Image: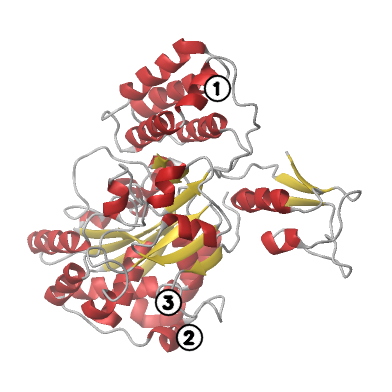
Amino acid sequence: MTSIVDPALGCVGQPRLLAGLDVLSRLDLANHLVVHGPLPQYDQGELVELAEGIDLKGRGGAGFPFARKLKAVIRSARTKEGRSAVVVNGTEGEPSCLKDAAVLLHSPHLVLDGALLAAAAIGAEEVAIGVTRDDVEQSLRAAVAERGVAASRVRVGRLPERFVTGEGTSLVNGLNGGAAVPNGQKVRTSERGLSGLPTLLSNTETYAQLAVAARLGVTGFRSVGLESEPGTVMLTISGSTVVEAPLGTSLAYVLELCGSSPGQGVLVGGYHGKWLTPAAARTALLSRESLTAYKATLGAGAILPLPEDTCPAGEVARVMRWMADETAGQCGPCVRGLPSLADAVEALVAGGGRAALEAVEMRMRAVLRRGACSHPDGTSAFMASALAVFPEEMRDHALGSGCGRRVLGALPLPEDENPEKLVVDWTLCKGHGLCMDVLPDVVRLDRDGYPAEAVMSVPGRLRPKALRAVRRCPALALRIQE
């Protein structure tokens, strides 16, 4: 299960989605209106014009133009006596992503604003919000209750916490009361989605951005970011820190602000994303145009730098096994293909020779374009990217020499039932207190400035910060114990 923790929040420049959170940890309805002001109303044509004017694209992974979705739902609704629905995807099954959870935990009314604005414009009968975390569900239900009758058409649905839950048809199936698995059909949710109605489906950040744009207007929204890609974007850095930054900001600059660097490479877009070499990560900008040049996309906004002191091949193998285990269990490429691919990657890391390298290549190709959803393709692409960016690492492991480094788990995965521990060596500790500065959610200091406990549990989502605390301890008094 996902731990109930608040991510660290940060901002490059003037915050929009995170406005007001430098003073308050959560904006209730009254404070939300003080910070953001009243929400204007838009009719169908005006909302389409706004979405087109700001070039709003989905922030959940595919980057599909929001205005095109709007127009498709409006067209389909005409065949259903004008009936339609709105769905907010707040499931965020990617373990390296926290940005949607951050918005729903800290500024839930911004998301409700966007969803209700769209629902009013298209005349939607219902707004459904799919979530997987207990704390996010509680935050949303409290926000809906604050609005009373104004949010009577909104319902919050709790779904299983799995990677494939966030796939469009899987999400809709779950909200309709069925199993949250992809249906494998080529029917768009804009034609048939929630309760069989034409459905406007997008993710949490997209609706929050729409609410911001409704207040700022096209000109105001476009005053930040690039001319070709206006506005800000929400990112999750190292699986633990959420940042809002203008589009076009330097990736290396954002990493530096978060106390990190490109390291051995940077995974952009999460576990269906692509690896950037350190050189590419130092020059890339947070924009579609810039990342396309490296055959990468921002996807759901997950940015994962790989530290110098961990084994790239071992890290990739851990993720590949988890991805194989996340199969929906209903099509061959997932049920058999991905576990077989994970087996081949583990054999490669264990020194399986050139035959293991060839097996990985063969099994990557075998799952492509054959699944009920994009999970097999995305997983295969992740592995292909790792082979391209870490060719020597993969070859050396396959041929038996390896890199000699441990696997530190820098790529976050859901926490185990038995979490790792941060252990203090009292014979070395000098009470510098830097560990608490880096890891305030875990470390507490006593009155003398020393850690109050010798052994502290580290939630899986905070592992990157724990690794940073270990590396930064001046006395080398910290270690992580499995």
Secondary element at tag 3: loop
Question: Which residue is identified by label 1?
Answer: 349
Distance between mark 3 and mark 1 Cα atoms: 45 Å
Quadrant in which residue 277 is drawn:
top left
Of marks 1 and 2, which one's residue comes earlier in the chain? 2
Q: On the picture, is 103 further left or further right than 39? A: right
Label of residue 31 in the image: 2
Question: Which residue is identified by label 3?
Answer: 14
Mark 3 surroundings within 10 Å by alpha-carbon count, few (fewer than 14), some (14 through 19), many (20 or more): few
Q: Nearer the viewer, mark 3 or mark 2?
A: 3
Write the residue at 42% across / 20% down: 360
Q: On the picture, is 121 further left or further right than 161? A: left
Of marks 3 and 2, which one's residue comes earlier in the chain? 3
Q: Where the C terminus falls, by quadrant? A: top right
Of marks 3 and 1, which one's residue comes earlier in the chain? 3
Q: Amino acid at mark 2?
A: Asn
Q: On the picture, is 139 further left or further right than 213? A: right
Asked if residue 482 is positioned above or below residue 127 in the image, the reply reads above
Q: Position of residue 101 (x, y in %)?
A: 48, 61
Quadrant in which residue 126 is drawn:
bottom left
Write the residue at 64% across / 41% down: 416
Q: Position of residue 280 (x, y in %)?
A: 40, 45
Q: Amino acid at mark 1?
A: Val
